[in-house]
Amino acid sequence: MYLFLFSLYVRVSSLLSLQRLFEEGEDMSHDANVIETWNEQLLELCVPSNFKVTIMYEPSLLQKIAEAGYSQKELSGFLDRMIPKLEIIKSLAAKQSAAMLKGTLKYRSDVWSINDWIGYLLDDAGDGLNYAYLLAAQIERAVDPETRARRG
């Protein structure tokens, strides 16, 4: 229910923002800000594999956790659970870095009006929401209806 309301809010907000921007005569395209030397072949550089992300924790962190009353075995268990989570974050950071490189190579500036930023954010949020719905539909098609019924 909350997802539906959020979705509706994003869609209505996006439409209202776009309408307001168009009424004010602002250009919603990034085209005016695109650097002339940009070409789609540069996308080959904008990939996560071009970035090395490292996440390290302070050595004192484990000591502080131990001082809070956790045993060495518990600390080991925490690390076993935490390391895969950090790997996810490293992967996400590399992807975000690639996206930031694309924006840096493609656009002249990162300084736009607040209305432009809101418009782009809402537009991307709408796309993201659509992707989530499409993914959910694909998962639904892939999972046996009998299994879906048991899981609710």
Image (spheres, grey):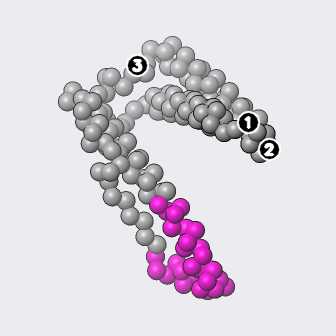
Does dot 3 land on a helix, a strand or a loop?
loop
Using the rendered image of the protein, determine whether residue 32 is visible from the camera's viewpoint.
yes
Q: Residues within 10 Å of mark 2 (few under 14, many from 20)?
A: few
Nearer the observer, disc 3 or disc 2? 2
Q: Earlier in the sequence, mark 1 or mark 3?
A: 3
Using the rendered image of the protein, determine whether residue 122 is visible from the camera's viewpoint.
no
As drawn, 91 above or below 1 = below
**Image quadrant for the N terminus?**
top right
- Residue at mark 2: 150
Determine whether, in the image, residue 26 is placed left or right of residue 81.
Answer: left
In front here: 108 or 142?
142
In front here: 47 or 33?
47
Q: Position of residue 124 (x, y in %)?
A: 50, 32
Q: CA distance from mark 1 to mark 3?
A: 47 Å
The three-letter amino acid code for the residue at tag 1 is Pro
Tell me the magenta residue range. 58-87
- Residue at mark 3: 27
Q: Position of residue 109 (x, y in %)?
A: 31, 35
Residue under the point 24% across and 33% down: 41
In the rendered image, which quarter is residue 5 located in? top right
Q: Position of residue 23 (x, y in %)?
A: 51, 13
Residue under the point 62% across and 25% down: 11
The three-letter amino acid code for the residue at tag 3 is Asp
What secondary structure prevails in the magenta region? helix
Q: Tell whether label 1 touches label 2 (CB within 8 Å).
A: no
In the rendered image, which quarter is residue 25 located in? top left
As drawn, 91 above or below 123 = below
- Residue at mark 1: 145
The three-letter amino acid code for the residue at tag 2 is Arg
Q: How many marks?
A: 3
